[in-house]
Amino acid sequence: MTTTRELAEFVQETSYGDLSPAVRDALKRRVLDSVGIAVAAAEAESTGVVDRTVADLEDGGPCTLWRRDRGASPVQAAMHNTALTRYLDYMDSFLAPGETPHPSDNLGAVVAAGEYADRSGEALLAGLAVAYEIQGELAWNAPVREKGFDHVTHTVVSAAAGAAKTLGLDVEATRDAIAIAGTAHNALRVTRTGGINEWKGIASANAARNAVYAAMLARNGMEGPRDLFEGQKGWQQVISGPFEVDLSPGERVHDVMTKRYVAETYAQSAVEGVIELARSEDIGPDEVAAIKLETFGGAKLIIGGGEGNRYEVETRAQADHSLPYMLAAALIDRDLSLEQYEPERIRRDDVQRLLRLVDVTEDPELTERFEAGEMPAVIDVTTDDGTTYRVEKDAFRGHPRDPMGWDELEEKFDAVAGERLGDDRRDDLVGTIRSLDERDVADLTALLA
């Protein structure tokens, strides 16, 4: 049975020097992906709500609020900046059979801790490695979705660990930070069931804020329930059940996927497939009689109707968790990017009509293949003349089996953030991230102000 001390000792013992060159490179690519998304998300209404709330609560502070002209405490910076990396639903995902968290949700917390403590880029990468590893191991070995808890229940633990590492806490203080975070902040799955609203895109920011606050409390001497996982009425007994983790120096980062399209994680293969089919067969939306998607259990459950009606789509939060909407918009526009989530696009008659022709079913064989590491999808598009076109996918570009390299990630970065940054700022930001282990955290945050 995993213990709280086991996680704390792992955090304490893992250093930048323990990270392989491949892990270091993968973590830097995660940073680039997340930062590009954050730049684009600064203009969203819901992230604006977070910004206004932070402004109401604080007047300045030592940590940068990304894309704003002021600072805040590390706690509020973690909240604000994580909202940016997460809100657009374009972030990375860890693929485990029973849980799909977003490890990039840790970045805002770890950067805030690193900026506050004036750490190096090497220290930042070590903190990220710890957070990615713990989140991946918890998702794989201790999924909580079926118990009714949201995946940010993992995030608050992993982000507290990453923040503790970056702040330089010792083993006992790290144990306290993890204990406080994991005891006090367990989120409910209702966030992503039924009628989804804007909190879906902000919940992980709240977890990041709570994680940094727990780490700051521990830094100043607050003790927590040090048997968080193993104790009576603790995490394993109440939330997850018994589990064991097998922690490595950040190797779990290689099991993280990059989203090619602005869509929920489980939609990536299906969206890629329907776009390929629409282009290759020149299928127009007016000639479509039916779209059938056979998929795996998690996709049917979360975005295919298993946890609520996915045909009533009026908002962005509903659209990016609706397979019918995503497939319909992707077939019509032959793309699924930020433009497809503009309110006027969501409400347009063409996509509202077509999404009601989408049928999503679970195939147990595809569920087995997903649990073995694929992301399968079988799409049939039938036209009015009775012709059926089929495409079958086992993964997508950006899946751990087919990862994106620096060139593709820079293309994605430019697509979402390029127009919002001047050429010099863009080049400086990409160059700083590529050489992060030769820089300080302050070098990165100065370019994000």
Image: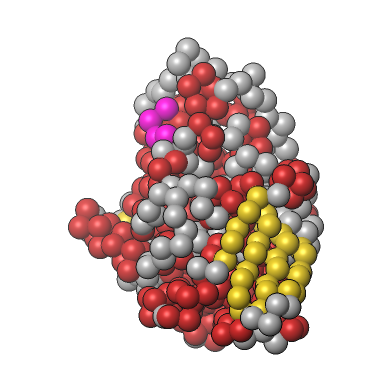
Q: Does the magenta-highlighted stretch encompass residue 85?
A: no
Visual colour scheme: secondary structure
Residue 17 seen in this snapshot: no
Q: Is residue 197 left or right of residue 104?
A: left
Q: Residue furthest top?
A: 232
Position of the C terminus, as image quadrant, is bottom left
Q: Position of residue 88 (x, y in %)?
A: 47, 65
Q: Extreme front residue here?
A: 385
- Residue at the image position 51 percent from the left and 42 percent from the top: 151
Q: What stretch is highlighted in magenta?
A: 183-187
Quarter of the picture holding the N terminus: top right
Q: Where is residue 130 in the image (x, y as percent from the top left)?
A: 62, 42
Is 114 drawn above or below residue 229 in the view shown? below
Name the main secondary structure of what is drawn in magenta: loop
Q: Nearer the viewer, residue 404 or 375?
A: 375
The residue under the point 65% across, 64% down is 292
